[in-house]
Amino acid sequence: MKQQLENLYKQTIATIEKAASIDELEQIRVKVLGRKGELTQILRSLGTLPQEERIETGKLSNELKDSIEEALEKRKIQLTQQHINKLIMEDWLDVTLTKPGLLQEYQRGHLHPISQIQYEIEDIFTSMGFEILDGPEVETDYYNFEALNIPPYHPARDMQDTFWTEDGNLLRTHTSAIQIRGMERLTPPFRVIGPGRVFRYESIDASHENTFYQVEGMMIDKDISVAHLIYFMKTLLKEIFKRNITIRLRPGYFPFVEPGFELDIQCLICGGKGCSVCKYSGWLELLPCGLVQPNVLRYGKIDPDKWSGFAFGLGLNRLVMMRYAINDIRHFLSGDIRFLYQF
Ligand code: FA5
């Protein structure tokens, strides 16, 4: 029986080493170690042997069984590794490959038109001594509303329909939230701009998105007046459009400025005749602004008896639309590469 066991062992090890798949290994395991397997049968017949031989053969059988199991496991690991290597070789992905048509048409990527104009605006304002600030997109009620003189239940909250989070915070509805964070951090006099993405729960049309971009601006100094505000707004528009454009300034209500204005630009899509972008009015709201309300200065820990300032909130998407005569705001987030490659 000892000889029979050793033969079975040698034969099994040889077939394990030659096995070419995990399935084959499993067949070998069942054939030798399964319930009706060859080694199992031998182990079952041990009872017929005389006691001394039984103990010795039993010990040997168990050792050979352990060794076969070990060989099966080792080969299984080898085969799995080979399989993985084969998959890697066959299914590898060349991330540098481009669809042939695309490669010829669109040789290189570039910045999104909104980012391009944002960086231009940053350059214009930094050259006039402004610092660039950032703020979080998920804001607290305090920074987005309360510290901007919009207390709970104030009707002005309806002007900006809000996406609320379950824990009572919100997606900022305007970059004005950055103003308060800036005032808390800086000591007057200062000039800052805060570009960023904002969100509003509103219906989308040719000139309204629920996700769009603004640039906030604020200057705090001694004796700031509407004349300073108009000077900076005119400089900005002259630099951006590099041509004569028609603007109008009219009173506008925002609880965080007093007086407040709406700076509208004559629609460059239709030349003021009226179209879907300007809602057939010939004008587009672009740049609301005003002198900072004293309460807001107090929220920002600035003494309104010593300091005054102006603030503005520029709609970046609409500015890009006017500059390039884009007739629908929905193109920006459409992900359509044919649109993006025009800039
Ligand atoms: C505000 O968001 C104020 N925080 C701006 C401000 C700042 C006023 C500082 C005074 C002082 P308004 O809701 O009007 O204001 O938005 C500002 C600009 O963002 C608009 O003129 C417009 O250009 C753009 N805008 C507003 N809503 C949308 C929208 N749904 N889609 C695209 N652009 C929008």
Image (spheres, rainbow, N blue to C red):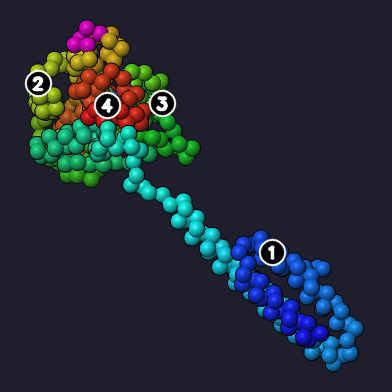
**Is residue 107 something one can see in this rendering?**
yes
Q: Is residue 271 magenta?
A: yes
Does label 1 or label 4 sit earlier along the sequence?
1
Write down the residue under mark 3.
201
Residue topped by disc 1: 26
225 lies above or below 8: above
Question: At 32% across and 25% down in the image, what residue appears?
Answer: 331
Q: Secondary structure at mark 1?
A: helix
How far apart are labels 3 and 2 at the CA level? 35 Å
Q: Which residues are magenta?
A: 270-274
What residue is disc 2 on?
A: 243
Query: Earlier along the polypeptide chain: callout 3 or callout 2?
Result: 3
Look at the image and tell me in which quarter the C terminus lies. Answer: top left
Between the residue at mark 1 and the residue at mark 4, the CA separation in whole angstroms equals 64 Å
Disc 3 CB within 8 Å of nearest ligand 1 atom: no
State the residue at coordinates (62%, 70%): 18
Q: Nearer the viewer, mark 1 or mark 2?
A: 1
The kind of residue tagged 3 is Tyr
* Dot 4 alpha-carbon crowd within 10 angstroms: few under 14, some 14 to 19, many 20 or more: many
